[in-house]
Amino acid sequence: MLESYLPQDFYLNRWTNLQPKAEGQFHASPEEIKRAALTRDKRYLRKEITKQKYVLFRAILENDVDACKKLLRTPLLLERHTSEGTTPLGLAAATGNAAIVSFLLDLGADVNARDRTGATPLHLAALLGHTDIIKMLLESKQGGTTGRDYLLRQGSHSGETPVMAAAKGGSVDALKELAKAGGETGTTCSVSGCSGVDCLMLASRHDRVETMKWLLERGLQPTRRDDIGRDALMHACCTGSLQAAELLLKSQPLGADLSARDSKGYSALHHACLGGNLRLVELLNDKLSGSNSINFTAGPEGGQLLCLACDAGQAGVAEWLLSNKAGKLEIVSEGPQNPLHAAVHAGRTEIIEVLLASGARIDVRDARGRTPLAWAATHGKDDMVRLLVSKGASMLSVDLHGRVPRQLAYLHRHWDLANMLSEMAKSSSWEARRKTSASASYALRQAWESWVKNSKGMGETCRCQGGCPCRNSLAAWVDASSTQALGCIWQAAARELWKEWIPECSCRANLATRTSWARIIMFYR
């Protein structure tokens, strides 16, 4: 009965023209069986190749030539790569095993294969200084005499050629071999988003002194600038390469290099503060003389150096600058550039300790009116918030928009930090909050406390000020219906105090209902 409601081709198999009965057993066609077997074999082969791939990489790293030859009987393994995109040939070139590299080249491994950074096996061999591997790659069938120039000119994603990789790695022999094959040492690449970096700058950044000497002998100029105006000395200073900086200072007359500045206005000393090598900072400071010297005690130069050191997290350099009276004005003055904000940005507690010990204001404000605590709350830095609060930072300070640190943390979706600030505010005593309050009624509240300090009870009478004819009880002074209190400054003071400190009271307009001074005393004590 059910079959009458089904279409006629309901039981048709798309792989065969046979139409089995509904109650009969399903029979696959020969074509379907063959296709299923091929699919199963491909899946099995893919799984096996994946397993063998990791075994092959381990064998290359362990320099097991026999295991590599046995595994490479499967040609598909030549096309496998690591998670970083390195092929078996690139991995063998990096390890420096000539036997495995020769075997892979004989099998037809691709010499031009790139990893995720765009580096070829020649880049890896040049970086690690494997001269014999460099020769084998350049003399291979894919290299030869026609493809050799292409291999030497081929750059990574940042434009780094094999010659630059050798300069960065510091292998003079690899540099000589590549230069002999036709590699150019005057080409440039991009480093950290900056283009125009040559081989001498790369060697300076990585403190490759011997390589720098060889490049200087080849005629490379240390005064050459990259696209943002940095020379080789600045590149050495920004990474803290002391020996490279000493070599560059000796290689040419002093003066032009130390006074030169990049497009941001930073000199070599600024980059040295960013690099964090204290010996290099002291060396440059000693070399500076005359008009090129930086006056730490006057002008914004010292404050800028201190801010750079704090922002880079260089505690030693920051302490040395403070000992030389650099940035003494900036740590206590408000403005867009403040070392304490930079230290909070770096997240270094020791720098904050040094700045506070040197007299820095903990509640100094930036251009948007935010204190270091507000800045830490905005960016969700829990450790910085705890440290600043423990050092006495105000949790009630507001920015230009009237927002306290807890509100800033909430607005930037740092829920846990906002709750932590709320708990800190609740657990703190009223005396601590009163000291940080900027309310205009603070002086008024102090006056009230001094007036009733010696009062024994609410019924005691006393004068509100000298010469006042009224002698009233404390309860009468806050009673607007009392005629004796008219013209007395106590009533006006009570109104102002009540408006300022009890704004949520529903009966604020009716002073006659508040006949007790104790309600005000209990509120803020």
Image (spheres, helix red, strand yellow):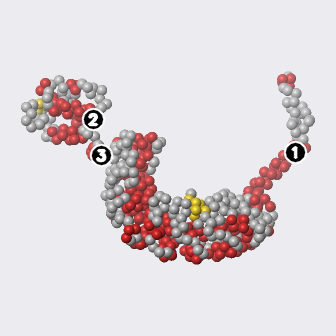
Vertical position of residue 17 compared to residue 149: above or below = above
* Frontmost residue, 48 versus 468: 468
- Counting residues from the start of the chain, the first of labels 2 and 3 encountered is 3
Disc 3 from disc 1: Cα separation = 83 Å
Real-space Cα separation, disc 1 to disc 2, in angstroms: 87 Å
Residue 110 horizontal/vertical position (percent)? 75, 63
Residue depicted at x 41% and y 65% = 316
Residue 72 drawn above or below residue 250:
above
Q: Position of residue 135 (x, y in %)?
A: 72, 73
Dot 3 corresponds to which residue?
436
Kindly identify which residue carries mark 1.
33
Determine the image quadrant of residue 403.
top left
For label 3, count other residues whose C-alpha is less than 10 Å away and answer few (under 14), some (14-19) or many (20+).
some
| Spot occupied by residue 38 in the image (x, y as percentages of width and height) | 84, 49
Sequence-first disc among 1 and 2: 1
Q: Nearer the viewer, residue 56 or 290?
A: 290
Report which residue position mark 2 lands on: 501
Seen in the image, is 72 located left or right of residue 14?
left
Q: Earlier in the sequence, mark 3 or mark 1?
A: 1
